[in-house]
Image (spheres, rainbow, N blue to C red):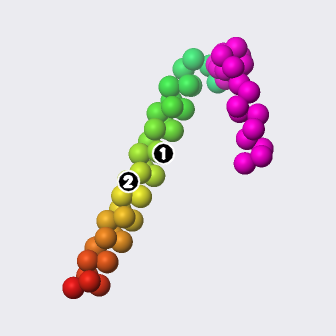
Amino acid sequence: MHNLLFLQNLGTGEIIIIALVVLLLFGGKKIPELMRSLGKGVKSFKDGLADVEKELKDDSDKDGQ
């Protein structure tokens, strides 16, 4: 937690500089691909969580009967 304190001090200027550096490193064509991959990963993670919650609910329903 203590290591993340630097994130509180980021202003608009710093965020713009970071975005420009990312744009220079990855290029304009790679960024949408990276975001698409990130979105698929997040969706997969949420689907996995929903599956686990469903299994837990089903197991608790079976134990309660």
The x, y position of residue 48, in whole percent, is: 41, 58
Q: Residue furthest left?
A: 65
Q: Residues within 10 Å of mark 2 (few under 14, many from 20)?
A: few
Could one spot residue 27 in this view of the protein? Answer: yes
- Left or right of 23? Residue 42 is left
Asked if marks 2 and 1 touch (Cβ < 8 Å), the reply is: no
Q: Amino acid at mark 2?
A: Asp
Q: Amino acid at mark 1?
A: Gly
Q: Residues within 10 Å of mark 1 (few under 14, many from 20)?
A: few
Residue 36 or 49: which is nearer the viewer? 49
Would residue 50 be counted in the magenta stretch? Answer: no
Which residue is found at the position 39% from the left and 65% from the top?
Answer: 52
Which residue is found at the position 57% from the left and 17% from the top?
Answer: 28
Q: Is the residue 48 above or below the residue 65 in the image?
A: above
Q: Is the residue 36 above or below the residue 11 in the image?
A: below
Reading the image, the residue beneath label 2 is: 47
Which of the marked residues, 2 or 1, is nearer the chain's N terminus? 1
Regarding mark 2 in the picture, which secondary structure is present there? Answer: helix
Residue 15 or 64: which is nearer the viewer? 64
**Distance Cα–Cα, label 2 vs label 1:** 10 Å
Of the 4 image quadrants, the one containing the C terminus is bottom left
Regarding mark 1 in the picture, which secondary structure is present there? Answer: helix
The x, y position of residue 37, in whole percent, is: 49, 38
Q: Is the residue 12 above or below the residue 42 in the image?
A: above
Q: Quadrant of residue 49?
A: bottom left
Q: How many marks?
A: 2
Q: Is the residue 35 above or below the residue 48 in the image?
A: above
Could one spot residue 20 in this view of the protein? Answer: no
Magenta stretch bounds: 1-24
Most frequent secondary structure within the magenta stretch: helix
Which residue is found at the position 56% from the left and 25% from the top?
Answer: 30
Reading the image, the residue beneath label 1 is: 41
